[in-house]
Image (tube, rainbow, N blue to C red):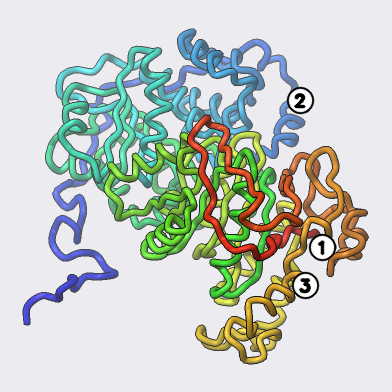
Amino acid sequence: FGAPRFGGSRGGPLSGKKFGNPGEKLTKKKWNLDELPKFEKNFYQEHPDVVRRTVQEVEQYRSSKEVTVRGHNCPKPIINFYEANFPANVMEVIQRQNFTEPTAIQAQGWPVALSGLDMVGVAQTGSGKTLSYLLPAIVHINHQPFLERGDGPICLVLAPTRELAQQVQQVAAEYSRACRLKSTCIYGGAPKGPQIRDLERGVEICIATPGRLIDFLEAGKTNLRRCTYLVLDEADRMLDMGFEPQIRKIVDQIRPDRQTLMWSATWPKEVRQLAEDFLKEYVHINIGALELSANHNILQIVDVCHDVEKDDKLIRLMEEIMSEKENKTIVFVETKRRCDDLTRKMRRDGWPAMGIHGDKSQQERDWVLNEFKHGKAPILIATDVASRGLDVEDVKFVINYDYPNSSEDYIHRIGRTARSTKTGTAYTFFTPNNIKQVNDLISVLREANQAINPKLLQLIEDRGSGKCCRSRGDRRDRYSAGKRGGFSSFRERENFERNYGALGKRDFGAKTQNGAYSAQSFSNGTPFGNGFAAAGMQAGFRAGNPAGAYQNGYDQQYGSNIANMHNGMNQQQYAYPATGAAPMIGYPMPTSYSQ
């Protein structure tokens, strides 16, 4: 009957040489270091202020910034930009961007990279790692001979996704223009012609995804003979996406005495093995806790629920978020089909939402991201293709509609908010189907001093007693009494949530000046109030965290008095979908519980 209608390779590598063994035409080069032209990679000169810094001052700085360093001959951190001795044109760009001081990874990473040492940087998202390797790359390039016709790039940055590659290119272009250097970005899903022309004209900096770079290397459109500065950005993500064979093929084309910098948000054994294979006597820099950790500027709220409840909870939550002035939100889902279905449903109901996933064309993805960045569509529904490298400064909310497959992906997802020193909020729908992830999630929450929903702990107890081992189709819980969704009617469910699950703002009392709720506000009126008050607010509502800047009371009629949304970007206002006059049900606001 011929080939299957929709292809027989679904779920596995496609048949054919191109997909079965990428890079098979590339042979491993046999390098003779005596025949290779020499190059310099140590350009670091300690500023007098750094030289005078005592060991005690260095340790105090590292401790205050949670910097952990391992390896030999690690230089002291720099505390001010001028101590890095960057070229004047680089400093002019830094001053134009109004940066006040280097981030922790920059302060410790710049001296290491400028010294020509191999290094591994493990840091949370939004920590400034892009400049940590790009500015030393510019210094490195300025000390190398000029490119000649037919030469490939001097600096190669490998990134897992085209979104991340494009964002690195935007940063690189600004600084390289100031230094009269050329950079380009090559990635799949875009025409090859312009990318090939850039490479043939000669570029000092090339930011690439592994697949497209392999294509160009095999076709002879570029080479890596001049590459002496290699960066692996988000190495853990590249391994997760199955790029290890391509990475190894690419690295085989680069001279072994190169300088290599590897960046990752996590440090699993697979990334450690890659570092051992590619780096020599490297310095390991870790920012933050050594165990799996999330950005402490993110308020994490976990709602334990069933799959059938997600849509209602999402709409209720979006009603609250869209009443805020800063309301840019990313909703993460697990599959492309779910992304399309949810986007279609929300747009049909009048929400300004757009979707992005790996099957979208590059033109459509670029357009969607541009609409989102400029506030024209403040709701972005995405698969994990956008969970790393998506750098939009003013994302205030992240919603995990589907919980990811690992806590590493969870951390990367919520890291799309609270970039740099800003704050943000992450909501997560956690179902009994995610029970395998519950221990890791609780560890992440505890490390970040977040409130632990008692229902998460109950899931662990239920798993131990075998209560969580029902089939996926059996959605019943102790409130269901055999009825679909647990309630015989919407009104019954509404009454239940009003009395138990959906805590209105009146239950929380008044907010303090910093936007958080006082411990006394929780002492009455909530199922967990007494425990929260006793905890003394030590479980997660810290000063500076926007626990929920929800300004509108719940006494208004849903659909009647809700003001049109203003997204703060002088864009067109969106009118919310008209609904019936059912009373507005408050989304369960977070409570804190004693640990």
Mark found first going from the N terminus, 2 or 1: 2
Residue at x 34%, y 28% (from the top left corner): 155
**Residue that carries the numbered disc 3 in the rendered image:** 500
Mark 2 touching mark 3, by CB under 8 A? no
Q: Position of residue 320 (x, y in %)?
A: 65, 52
In what element is the residue under mark 2? helix
Q: Which of the two discs, 2 and 1, sits closer to the camera?
A: 1
Q: Which residue is mark 1?
A: 593
Give above or below for 446 relative to 39.
Answer: below
Query: What residue is at 14 percent from the left and 49 percent from the top?
Result: 25
Q: Amino acid at mark 2?
A: Glu
Q: Amino acid at mark 1?
A: Tyr
Question: Is label 1 in a helix, a strand or a loop?
Answer: loop
- Left/right placement of residue 105 relative to residue 11 reads right
- Residue 479 position within the rendered picture, expressed as x and y whole percent measured from the top left: 70, 84
Q: Is residue 399 left or right of residue 208?
A: right
Dot 2 or dot 3: first in sequence order is 2
Q: Is residue 71 visible?
A: no
Density class for disc 1 (Cα within 10 Å; few <14, some 14-19, many ≥20) is: many
Which quarter of the picture shows residue 457? bottom right
Q: Which residue is mark 2?
A: 57
Q: Earlier in the sequence, mark 3 or mark 1?
A: 3
- Left or right of 530 on screen, residue 367: left
Q: Amino acid at mark 3?
A: Tyr
The Cα–Cα distance between marks 2 and 3, rounded to whole angstroms, is: 52 Å
Secondary structure under the numbered disc 3 in the rendered image: helix
- In the picture as drawn, the residue positioned furthest to the left comes out as 1
**x%, y% of residue 588?**
71, 62
